[in-house]
Image (spheres, helix red, strand yellow):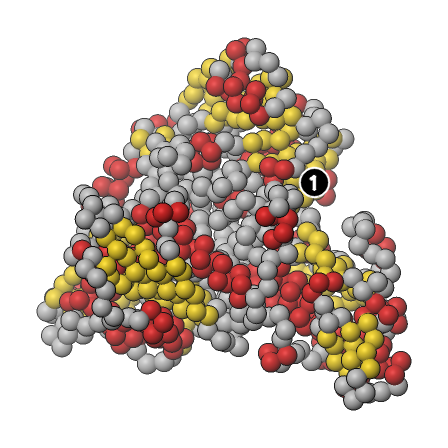
């Protein structure tokens, strides 16, 4: 079974059909309708042949009330990316709305209304940018038509601004609220009648806009998953099997039940092997009146486990085995030219193995969910990135129709891909059904770190050849890591096309011979996607090797990259794919080509802004790397300082980014600032190790996230002014940071880094 992930094939395109929704359609949303103009937006998508794949039932997406209030439904999950602000902002800007009069309401899980709500893969803006603009433009034209009729002037003489229609010739104005009743009686314009604004007319798109949740978050009013409550709610914590694939042999809950406040002890059947992306792991739940009693009860549980076939698994041993496999021939996935021939004739051969550990998401808010199962239905409150996936999994587990399951999406205290999996939500639903009252499942920090869907450990070997003319003549990249697909299908042993397309098979440099090979790597853990996924180890290997190639060629690293990118051109990769295809993050490469010119421009920009080549004190240096991920071009320069105790500090980080049309520049900068901090943890701190099948780390003392004294001091983000289609920004900051940091460490100390996390003391 293949499970949709952020890098698998998505629908070819998403467009919108705009219609007038009835008040009846909207009544059940509650409190959003006071009369006026009510527009629905029916998203639909097409496959490669143009066939309509999904049409959504009438839904209210945009409402303009008679008092001037504008209500826009946000159908994506908010976890700090600002998507609950950015998508409505697109509608409002095209409409010409006064942003202070816009109210945003979180949508529940319902694909019939809102289409794909899975907030993963940095694709929300790129998928919905055009439909959102069309929705705003439709309402805008209706209001202008209503005003033009009242003034008896041509509609072409009208415009909108600050929630008013303006007659440009006379400067007359009418507020939106005074026009909505008349506008609601007009025929909905066809797509051919719509005229989208020119970029020069944008008031919000391309500018800074604070997120709508900011005030509530900083004042403690915002509702995260942990804040959700229900009448008669009880708390559950779970003692999970320490080894993936294990099951309960027996358990004794007598001591747990003796703890004051503990009500029930209930076993949960696990998925076994494969662990899957949509089922819980085996465990025993303690249900209590409060969290403290539940935790104390869990501590007293006596459980005998059947640990299963992963009981002897050792991650260090697997890394050693994969390193040995790197020196054998693998499965060729992409091929250009004859690498064996160029290798035999090379003047210089550079050959290194790069290793990276398992990584945990370690979100500040651990997994949690509240479920109320009653009268054959279930209502959920959860910080979920994938409400529809959660709804469907709950319905299947409970044996009820999906229409009987309602998922309310709260704010997420961090997601990074972890909260797209519904295992913790399923636990709450199953326990509520069994217990007979509302249950909130609360994972502890230890639960989260020991039972995550980890970013896979990785071993990669890169062999680069330089010919007699000092040209890079060959590139041979060997890759082995447990595939995410193996979490669903234990027989999968090699990386998928989607995983390889995260920086490996889309190697863009103009090299005569390229050979990409994969090797078997059995999965023993729950492996999933984490912010930028396999871009992390693949960019680490490629970016650090590129720096070493520059040194061997006696070239500046920036000059080396610019030269190897070759002439400005669009690259496709499918003609060189030996097995499989290049997925291009689910997009048609004709619409989102790999453009070397755009990459060269961000490299040149970051070099200029960082003062590349400037003199720094001894022990300090700059390092560079560039990487394209989630269709966004990023160049990064990291400045490091290494003291006499081999401690690394980061005075400055410089990013140049081309993400196409920049919708909310405030959020783009914030994502890159946060991405640099996230990547610093990966580069210098993060490592999950497994011994006898059990994760050895269990809290922030043993699995550290970067502390403020160690964090980058200044992060500078330079955003390209582009009219191209918008692309992702949540994940692209992460991949180039680690190789840029490692290259800076080498420049400062003379020590090359081939293993993560960086440790200069070994």
Q: Mark 1 points at which residue?
A: 405
Q: What residue lies at 45% left-to-right and 41% top-to-bottom?
A: 362
Residue 434 higher or lower than 55, as above or below: above
Q: What residue lies at 67% left-to-right and 48% top-to-bottom?
A: 109
Q: Which of 195 and 272 is in front in this view?
A: 195
Q: Which of 501 and 129 is in front in this view?
A: 129
In this picture, residue 65 sits left or right of residue 741: right
In this picture, residue 368 sits left or right of residue 185: left
| Residue 313 at x, y percent in the picture | 32, 32
Q: Residue extending furthest front? A: 617
Dividing the picture into quarters, in which one does residue 93 lie? bottom right
Q: Is mark 1 on a helix, strand or loop?
A: strand
Quick check: can you spot residue 187? no
Give neighbour class at mark 1: few <14, some 14-19, many 20+ (Cα, 10 Å).
many
Residue 712 higher or lower than 97, as above or below: above
Quick check: can you spot residue 611? yes
Q: Which of 710 and 455 is in front in this view?
A: 710
Q: What residue lies at 41% left-to-right and 33% top-to-bottom?
A: 699
| Residue 155 at x, y percent in the picture | 80, 84
Dividing the picture into quarters, in which one does residue 451 lie? top left
Residue 556 higher or lower than 382, as above or below: below
Q: Which of 84 and 99 is in front in this view?
A: 99
| Residue 283 at x, y percent in the picture | 50, 25
| Residue 96 at x, y percent in the picture | 71, 72
Q: Name the quarter where the C terminus is drawn.
A: top left
In this picture, residue 329 sits left or right of residue 497: left
Q: What residue lies at 54% left-to-right and 14% top-to-bottom?
A: 256
């Amino acid at each position: 079974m293949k499970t949709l992930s952020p890098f698998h094939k998505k629908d070819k395109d998403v467009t919108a059909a705009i219609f007038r929704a009835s008040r009846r359609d909207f009544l059940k949303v509650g409190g959003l309708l006071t009369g006026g103009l009510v527009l629905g937006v029916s998203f639909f998508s097409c496959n490669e042949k143009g066939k309509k794949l999904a049409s959504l039932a009438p839904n209210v997406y945009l409402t303009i009330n008679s008092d001037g209030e504008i209500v826009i439904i946000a159908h994506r999950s908010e976890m700090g990316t600002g998507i609950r602000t950015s998508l409505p902002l697109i509608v409002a800007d095209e409409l010409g709305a006064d942003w202070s009069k816009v109210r945003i309401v979180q949508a529940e899980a319902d694909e019939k209304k809102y289409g794909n709500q899975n907030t993963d893969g940095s694709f929300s803006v790129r998928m919905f940018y055009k439909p959102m603009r069309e929705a705003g433009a439709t309402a805008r034209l209706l209001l202008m038509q209503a005003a033009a009729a009242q003034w008896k002037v041509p509609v072409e003489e009208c415009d909108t601004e600050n929630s008013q229609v303006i007659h440009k010739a006379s400067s007359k104005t009418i507020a939106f609220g005074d026009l909505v009743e008349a506008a609601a009686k007009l025929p909905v314009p066809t797509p051919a009648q719509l005229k989208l604004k020119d970029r020069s007319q944008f008031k919000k798109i391309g500018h800074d806009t604070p997120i709508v949740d900011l005030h509530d978050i900083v004042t403690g009013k915002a509702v995260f998953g942990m804040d959700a409550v229900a009448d008669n709610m009880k708390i559950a914590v779970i003692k999970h099997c320490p080894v993936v694939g294990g099951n309960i042999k027996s358990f004794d809950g007598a001591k747990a039940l003796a703890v004051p406040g503990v009500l029930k002890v209930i076993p949960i059947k696990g998925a076994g092997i494969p662990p899957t992306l949509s089922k819980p792991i085996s465990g025993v739940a303690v249900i209590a009146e409060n969290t403290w009693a539940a935790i104390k009860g869990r501590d007293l549980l006596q459980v005998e486990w059947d640990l299963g076939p992963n009981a002897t698994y050792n991650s260090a041993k697997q890394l050693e085995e994969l390193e040995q496999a790197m020196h054998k021939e693998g499965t060729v996935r992409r091929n250009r030219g004859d690498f064996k021939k160029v290798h035999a004739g090379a003047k210089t051969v550079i050959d290194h193995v790069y290793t990276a550990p398992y990584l945990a998401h370690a979100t500040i808010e651990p997994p949690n969910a509240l479920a109320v199962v009653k009268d054959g239905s279930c209502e959920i409150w959860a910080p979920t990135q994938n409400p529809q996936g959660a709804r469907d999994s709950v319905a299947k587990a409970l044996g009820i129709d999906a229409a009987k399951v309602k998922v309310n999406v709260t704010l997420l205290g961090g997601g990074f891909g972890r909260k797209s999996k519904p295992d913790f939500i399923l636990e709450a639903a199953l326990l509520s059904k069994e217990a007979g009252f509302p249950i909130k499942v609360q994972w502890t920090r230890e639960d989260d770190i020991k039972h995550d869907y980890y970013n896979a450990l990785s071993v990669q070997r890169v062999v680069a050849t330089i010919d007699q003319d000092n040209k890079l003549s060959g590139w041979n990249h060997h890759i082995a890591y447990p595939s995410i697909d193996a979490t669903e299908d234990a027989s999968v042993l090699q990386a998928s096309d989607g995983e390889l397309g995260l920086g490996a098979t889309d190697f863009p440099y103009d090299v005569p011979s390229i050979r990409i090979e994969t090797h078997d790597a059995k999965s023993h853990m729950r492996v999933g996607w984490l912010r930028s996924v396999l871009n992390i180890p693949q960019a680490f290997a490629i970016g650090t090797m590129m720096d070493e190639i520059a040194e061997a060629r006696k070239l500046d690293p920036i000059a080396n990259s610019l030269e190897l990118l070759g002439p400005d051109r669009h690259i496709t990769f499918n003609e060189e794919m030996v097995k499989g295809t290049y997925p291009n993050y689910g997009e048609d490469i004709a619409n989102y080509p790999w453009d070397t010119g755009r990459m060269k421009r961000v490299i040149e920009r970051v070099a200029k802004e960082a003062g590349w080549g400037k003199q720094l004190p001894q022990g300090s240096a700059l390092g560079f790397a560039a990487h394209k991920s989630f269709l966004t071009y990023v160049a990064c320069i990291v400045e490091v300082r290494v003291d006499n105790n081999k401690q690394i500090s980061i005075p400055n980080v410089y990013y140049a980014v081309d993400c196409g049309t920049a919708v909310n520049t405030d959020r783009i900068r914030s994502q890159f600032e946060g991405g640099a901090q996230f990547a610093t943890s990966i580069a210098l701190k993060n490592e999950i190790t497994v011994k006898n099948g059990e994760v050895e780390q269990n809290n922030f003392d043993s699995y550290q996230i970067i502390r403020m004294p160690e964090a980058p001091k200044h992060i500078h983000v330079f955003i390209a002014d582009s009219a191209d289609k918008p692309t992702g920004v949540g994940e692209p900051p992460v991949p180039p940071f680690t190789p840029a940091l490692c290259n800076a460490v080498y420049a400062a100390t003379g020590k090359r880094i081939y293993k993560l996390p960086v440790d200069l003391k070994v």
